[in-house]
Image: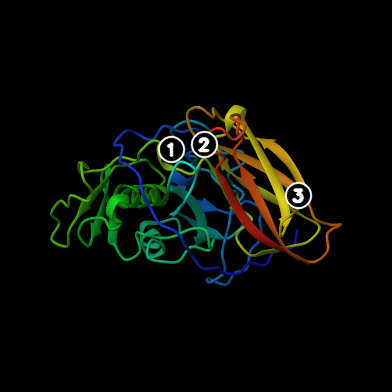
Amino acid sequence: MSIRRTVAPLATSAVLALTLAACGGTDDSDRAGASGDGASSDSSPSAPVSTSSDAGSGDGGGTDAGEGDGGGDAATAVYFVTPGPLGDRLVREFQPGGADLASAVDLLSGTPQDPDYTNPASGWVQEATQDGDEIVATVAGAAPGGEGAALVVQQVVYTLQAAVGDTLPVRFVDADGGDVTVASGAANPVEAAPQLDTLLLVNVTDPAEGTTVSGSFTATGRASSFEANVPWELRRGDEVVDSGFVTHEGDWATGLGPWEVTVDVSALDPGTYTFVARTDDPSGGEGPGPAEDTKDVVVR
């Protein structure tokens, strides 16, 4: 697979009630930061980076200290916001940087690669350090986002936990070190809310938005889908040129598990295509509908 990546702009906003329960999921691979495990990428620091380390990451609430095999560029897992059938949710994106708190803080003020994502936390977090069994985040007042402030808080919690590779609670403080009430009903420090209440139920983390491919490409991500079934499509405009499904790992009823699929593009005309992964919809359209995440790829 030949890969070249470019950067894309952002869109959308945030709402969610804050739940201060421990993160209950099947895949906490991002808590160990990230390094790509086979997907090649440009070495330019401005180029998007994605990682295929989702596949094969462990279940349970612990961290995968050995995530990635060193075959790709270092990347930072950062969370953004996107709309879904159950309201605004968090999605994970890998961007160039070290798996450390300084890189995470920088990216929390940056721009998502995917134009379907938005960053309501931009400019809010000033600094973050680890202090024993807590992460301490210095912020500029209460969380932005109005009714969506609780989700912005979780955006920061998930991102900083990914940087340290552990589900440590996050204490929010002002420039003088005093505790900050960041959202209505939020105690300090703040725990990560459960995945199923917080994350979009399907997430594509590889390929990155704007990846150039030839021959075939491997798509990876995480999902919590009915009976672990993740339907996917490759579209050119409104035309579906390929489709299938993949089974994700882990217990779909308790959290998101990793999935991986290889897509053959060798017979396709050059141009821009959209890879779509979604959750299965057992209601047949009677419920809120499936969650979906998309990434544009350029076939050459």
Quick check: 286 left or right of 211?
A: left
Badge 2 marks a residue whose secondary structure is loop
Q: Which residue is mark 2?
A: 256
Task: List x then y, in percent, for residue 179.
Answer: 15, 51
**Alpha-carbon distance for marks 2 and 1?**
7 Å
Direction from residue 42 to residue 78 in the image, left or right: left
Can residue 33 be seen at all in this image of the molecule?
A: no
Question: Hey, which quadrant is residue 6 in on the image?
Answer: bottom right
Q: Nearer the viewer, residue 228 or 29?
A: 228
Please report whichever mark, 3 or 1, sits nearer to the chain's N-terminal start. Answer: 1
Residue that mark 3 sits on: 263
Is residue 125 placed above or below 133 in the rendered structure? below
Identify the residue at image location x=20%, y=44%: 188
Asked where in the image residue 169 lies, by quadrant, the reply is top left
Q: Amino acid at mark 1?
A: Gln
> The disc labelled 2 sits on which kind of residue?
Leu
Q: Is residue 163 above or below residue 46?
A: above
Residue 281 spot, x, y in % from top left: 60, 34
Q: Which amino acid, by three-letter code, is at mark 3?
A: Val
Q: Which mark is residue 195?
A: 1
- Report the quarter where the C terminus lies: bottom right
